[in-house]
Image (spheres, rainbow, N blue to C red):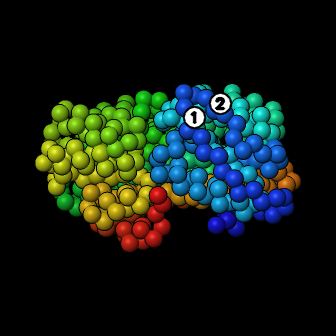
Amino acid sequence: MRDPTMSGIGSVRAGRLVAVGCVMALALGSAAACNRGSGEDVVGLITKTDTNPFFVQMKKGAQAEAEAEGLELQTFAGKQDGDNEAQVQAIENLMSFGAKGFLITPNDSKAIVPSIDKAHEQDMLVIALDTPVDPPDAADATFATDNYQAGKLIGQWAKAKFAKDSKQAKIAMLDLNANGVSVDVKRDQGFLDGFGIPVGDPNKIGDENDPRIAGHDVTDGAEDGGRTAMENLLQKDPSINLVYTINEPAAAGAYQALKSAGKDKDVTIVSIDGGCPGVDNVSKGVIGATSMQFPLKMAQLGVDAIAAYAKDGTKPQATPGKDFYDTGVELITDDPQAGVDAKDSAWGKQNCWG
C-alpha cells in the first residue's frame, strides 16, 4: 500500500527478509533487548501504548511493510498514554541495536526531543507518526492526520445539524489529558472552529469563554475515562446536548454515561478515529459523525521512508503547504448535512481499522 505521490520515498528490496517482530510493553519504564538485529536491517516502532486499536493497526502496517522491505521490525510501547520514560528507554535500545531509524508516536512531544537528538547523532532517521514532536523539525518528518481538519469536519457537521434542527448547543468537551499534546489541542480547537466558536489561544485547550461550552474534562482516550468525564460534566450541566470526544473509545464511554442518565436519545456525540468499533457505533446511532484517519498508511509510509534512507540517504518530503505529510481524513456519518462532504458507515466499514 505505497503512495506513489510520496516524494523521496522508494522501495528497497535488497537485504535479507527477516519477519521478526518484538512486542514490548515497557513495564516500569524499562525495556530489554529482543531479537537484536544487525543494525542496518533494523527499524523501530515506538507507540504510546500497545492496547489502543489505533496503535495495534500501526503495528500491523509497519510489520507487513518491514517484511516486504527486508527489514527487521522492533516494536515498543509505553504502559499508558503519557509514559515518556518508556519511550526514552526504547530509543536507547534502538540506538544500542544500531537501528537505521524509527517511527514514534510521542507521549510527550517536548520531553522526547533530547532522546531524538541523541538518535540523530547516531545518524538515525526519526519519523513522528500521528503526533508531531515539539518543535516539529526535531524529527526528520511527520506522517499524520491533519488533526485540526479532523476536528473541524465534525464541528462543521454538528453546526449544520444543530442549525437544521433549530437547536441551541450546550457542549461537553471530552479531551485527552492535561499535557496539552498537539493531537489533543488541534482536534479540540478544530472542532470549536468548525462549530463557529471563537477560540482564545489556538495552542491551548479550555480558554474560550463561549457560554455554549458546558465544560472540559479528560478521558485518557479510554472508555472508562470517557464515562467518568461525561458523568462529571453532566453533574455540572445536565442540559448538555452535544459531546465532542477526542476519540471513539472515549465516545463509547460517554454514551454509556448518557444512557445511564437516560439522556442517550437527546445528545449528539461526535468523535475522531475511524476504527471499526467506532464506525459500527455510527451505524447504530451511538456516534453521530466521526472523522476517519488512516494509521495503516502512516506506518507503511514511515517504514518505506526508513528503507529509502537506508538505501541512499533520501529523506521524505512534506505535503506541499504543510509541515508534515498528510495521510488524509474522511468524515463518516449516516446523517449527512448540507455543505459537509461525508461518506456513510457502509463505506466506513470497508475502510476502517482495528
Of callouts 1 and 2, which one flags the residue occurring earlier in the amino acid sequence? Answer: 1
Disc 1 + disc 2, Cβ < 8 Å: yes
Q: In which image quadrant can residue 24 be found?
A: top right
CA gap, disc 1 to disc 2? 9 Å
Residue under label 1 = 26
Q: Amino acid at mark 2?
A: Gln
Report which residue position mark 2 lands on. Answer: 89
- The N terminus lies in which quarter of the figure? bottom right
Q: Secondary structure at mark 1?
A: loop
The image shows residue 291 at horizontal and vertical percentages of: 42, 57
Query: x, y percentage for residue 102?
Result: 70, 44
Callout 1: few (<14), some (14-19), or many (20+) C-alpha neighbours within 10 Å? many
User: What amino acid is labelled 1 in the image?
Assistant: Leu
- Taking the view exactly as shown, the residue that stands out farthest to the front is 35
Instruction: For mark 2, give the secondary structure.
Output: helix
Q: Residue at x 77, y 34 (%)?
A: 96
